[in-house]
Image (spheres, rainbow, N blue to C red):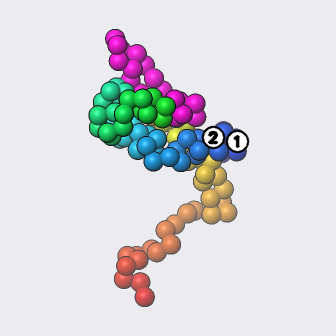
Amino acid sequence: MSLLQPKEAVTVLAALAQESRLAVFRMLVQVGPEGMAATKISEQLGVPASSLSFHLKELAHANLVTTRQDGRFIYYAANFGRMNDLMAFLTDNCCGGNPCAPICSTDCSTAA
């Protein structure tokens, strides 16, 4: 059962419903818990620092990222707990309580 309430889920989904923010979040998920400095995120995604700051603020508002300061750098990391809460919310009572299975049990490309 998800601890996320519907209003919170809308906030999280709205934060991810923008191409740059989605790219940032996906990159941070790939990087793992150690996170990445904002300057590196900007460089890797080609997002200007001023725009990135806005996007990171939106992700932080939705509690999708955590921050830590190390010297003069701010590191951002995906909040995996929040991501898991969203996944649990979206799949709560999935398939009417029955085990979920793919639509095709074999290679769908060969199905007639």
Quadrant (top left/top right/bottom left/bottom right) for the N terminus: top right
- Disc 1 on helix, strand or loop? helix
Left or right: 90, with 78 as reference point: right
CA neighbours of label 1 inside 10 A, class few (<14), some (14 to 19), many (20+) = few
Residue underneath mark 2: 11
Q: Position of residue 97 (x, y in %)?
A: 66, 60
Left or right: 64, with 107 as reference point: right
- Res. 7 mark: 1
Viewer-proximal residue among 13 and 5? 13
CA neighbours of label 2 inside 10 A, class few (<14), some (14 to 19), many (20+) = some
**In the image as oriented, which residue stretches furthest toward the bottom?**
112
Quadrant (top left/top right/bottom left/bottom right) for the C terminus: bottom left
User: At 42% from the left edge and 33% from the top edge, which residue is drawn?
Assistant: 52
User: At 38% from the left edge and 23% from the top edge, which residue is drawn?
Assistant: 75
- Disc 2 on helix, strand or loop? helix
Q: Does the magenta stretch include residue 83?
A: no
Residue 26 visible in image: no
Left or right: 36, with 105 as reference point: left
Tell me if label 2 and label 1 are in contact, CB under 8 Å.
yes
Q: Position of residue 46 (x, y in %)?
A: 32, 39
User: At 52% from the left edge and 34% from the top edge, which residue is drawn?
Assistant: 59
- Res. 109 mark: none
Amino acid type at circle 2 is Thr
Q: Position of residue 91 (x, y in %)?
A: 60, 53
Magenta range is 57-77
Amino acid type at circle 1 is Lys
Can you say whether 112 is above or below 22 in the image?
Answer: below
Viewer-proximal residue among 15 and 79? 15
How far is disc 2 from disc 1 in space, using C-alphas? 6 Å
User: At 41% from the left edge and 39% from the top edge, which residue is drawn?
Assistant: 24
